[in-house]
Amino acid sequence: MDKPKITVLMPVYNAEKFVHEAISSVLAQTFTAFELLIINDGSTDDSLFIIETFKDERIRIISQPNKGVAAALNLGLIYANADYIARFDADDICYPNRLQVQYDFIIANPSYQIVGSGADYIDLVGESVFTYSANAQTYEEILALNPKICPFIHSSVLYKKETIVKNGGYNEYAYTFEDHLLWANILSVEKACNLNQSLIKVRLSPDSITIDEKWRTSLFKKIKYAALNQLDISKADGLKLLEIGKKQHSIKIKQGAYYALLGKKYLWNNHQPQKARENLRKTLAISPFHLKNYFLYLCSYLPENLLHLGYHSVKTNFGTQKHELSIYSTKYTNGS
């Protein structure tokens, strides 16, 4: 095939449940001048077998031993043939116009280096949870964000390969926030924005290595935020994060964090109090000592207008502009 205009870069590790749907959504794009570069990061399930059932010349597969998402992405940047990279995760779904919309924008606005979008969030079985539109859409709004808040949904971004490569690519010690640290390093000099439309479906899943940050240890958060302030992270700190992450990579913690997040989303972002209570009961059964979830459960009985008034008042008073799903900006199914 001729040189592609876009490389869709998708790392895969043990994503057999979802990878067929993810690949199918890329192949169904209205924009066709792309390659789909899949980095199989040492999968031990049937992911590779499923990938190889697709017979499309636009698909390229590179396999490596399991090294983690950042290493997989850096390898992908080396082998990508296109000048533009569309990031994508193996458990998400692209809308058919995703590539066309972002490509048209970045070609028409060449000063922009990174273009993200909104997303429709779905649960483990594909049911709609809520629609997310980025609080920070313009470049100026992105620069004004609290540094702790990731400005993009990682699997939604399209960026210029040259810009990312010249800034060193993804830091492989920034466990679960390699994208956030990359943006922090380049946004002061490189222009970016989020489009005000949903171009992907993002799947929330207990299989992801990323969890609601409220379930992370204080040491994990201390190291992460220090790295974001310093715009770098040491190997020693990276290994500490990896060790913490492996200890928290348990069914109990993963499922507890997953149901807690669904409970909050059905409470604040898509008011369905019955669904909120169902998920909060599940997380309380798993982890009964997370006291905030009892408070959220009680809040689910408040009238919607009163609930939203209190929520927005808290956001305003504490200046959070909360993007609670920045913790899902890098979702890497069962990865390490």
Image (cartoon, rainbow, N blue to C red):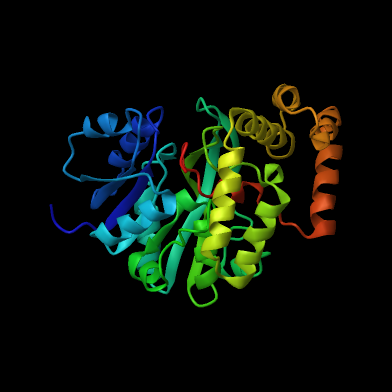
Quarter of the image for residue 270 reads: top right
Counting the numbered discs, the total is: 0
Which residue shows up at 37% across the image and 29% down it? 16
Which residue shows up at 57% across the image and 37% down it? 249
Q: Which residue, as the protein is rendered here, is positioned at the far left?
A: 1
In this rendering, would 93 be left or right of 229?
left
Whether residue 180 is situated above or below residue 19 in the rendered picture: below
- Residue 124 location (% of width, % of height): 53, 28
In this rendering, would 291 be left or right of 278?
right
| Viewer-proximal residue among 202 and 257 | 257
- Residue 255 location (% of width, % of height): 62, 29
Question: Taking the image as drawn, is residue 221 in sight?
Answer: yes
- Residue 87 location (% of width, % of height): 40, 52
Question: Taking the image as drawn, is residue 274 in sight?
Answer: no
Which residue shows up at 80% across the image and 31% down it? 289
| Viewer-proximal residue among 117 and 170 | 170
- Residue 229 location (% of width, % of height): 64, 69
Q: Which residue, as the protein is rendered here, is positioned at the far front?
A: 236
In this rendering, would 315 be left or right of 259?
right
Q: Which residue, as the protein is rendered here, is positioned at the far bottom?
A: 189
Quarter of the image for residue 300 reads: top right
Whether residue 184 is situated above or below residue 305 in the rendered picture: below
